[in-house]
Amino acid sequence: MESWTIKALRKKMTDTKDKLNEAKYFLTCMKVTRSEEDIFRYYVSAFLAAVDSVVDIMGTEFCQSHEFPKWWSQKKEEIGSEYDYFHEQRNRTLHVRALKATSTIRINVSQGIGVSETLKLVVPGTASMLKTELHSYVSTQQESGSTIDSDWFFEDRDKEPIVSLCEAYLGRLESIVGECESKFTPRPTKDIK
C-alpha cells in the first residue's frame, strides 16, 4: 500500500519539483558531511549540478505556456547575480576543475569546572590532516563536552559558508518553482524529448 502511495505522489510531482528535491537531498548530505572534506566537496558538486538543472528542466517542462518566457525573465532578474554565481560555480566545478574551498575549524574545549575556550582556525585548502589531529585531542576531552566543527567557503566568498549560501539560494529557487507550478501547466512528460 505504501509503495502505491509513493508512486502516486511521484506521478503528481513535476520533473522540476523532483530535481529540486534532488538538490535538497544533496544539501542535506552537505550538512552531515562538513567534517569530511572530500565527501563534502563531492556533495557540493552534485548540489551545484542538480540546482542548475532545476532551471533547465523548469524551462523545458513549462515552455508551452506563452507567458512563461516573460515570467521567467522577470524571475531571473530577481535572482540575477545569485543565479549567475551558482551557474558559474557549477560550470567551473563540472568542466574546469575540482571545487576549491577553504575551511574554518572551530574547537570548543570545555573543562569540568565550567571553563570554556573556543579556538578558531582558518585553513586554506586541505584541512583533513590538521582536523584529524585536533579531533583526537578533542576526543580525549569528550567527557567534558568538547566539540569540533567546521565550515567550508567558496574561494571567492569567504564571509558566508557554502552550506548557508546554498540553503538561501535553494529557498529562493523553491519559491520560484512553487509560483511556476501554480501559474503554468506542465507539458506532459511523454511530449518532452
Image: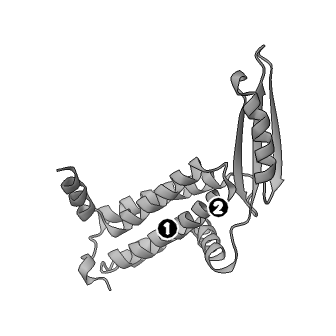
**Location of residue 141 by image quarter:** top right
Disc ID at residue 169: none
Residue 176 shows up from this direction:
no
Q: What crowding class fits label 2: few (fewer than 14 Cα within 10 Å), some (14-19), or many (20 or more)?
A: many
- Tell me if mark 1 has few (under 14), some (14-19) or many (20+) residues whose alpha carbon lies within 10 angstroms of its own: many
Quadrant occupied by the C terminus:
bottom left
User: Residue drawn at (45%, 76%), measured in percent from left and top?
Assistant: 56
Examine the image and state in which quarter residue 126 appears: bottom right
Hey, what amino acid is under mark 1? Ala
Q: Amino acid at mark 2?
A: Arg
Q: Secondary structure at mark 1?
A: helix
How many numbered marks are there?
A: 2
- Which label number is shown at residue 41? 2
- Where is mark 1, residue-wise? 50
Residue 54 x %, y %? 45, 69
Chosen colour scheme: one colour
Say whether disc 2 or disc 1 marks the residue closer to the N-terminus: 2
Spot occupied by residue 148 in the image (x, y as percentages of width and height):
72, 38
| Residue at image location 30% in from the left, 69% down from the top | 184
Name the residue at 32% across, 64% down.
Answer: 181
Q: Is residue 108 above or below residue 190?
A: above
Looking at this view, is 71 or 172 the one in front?
A: 172
For residue 109, above or below residue 92: above
Between 141 and 169, the one nearer to me in the picture = 141
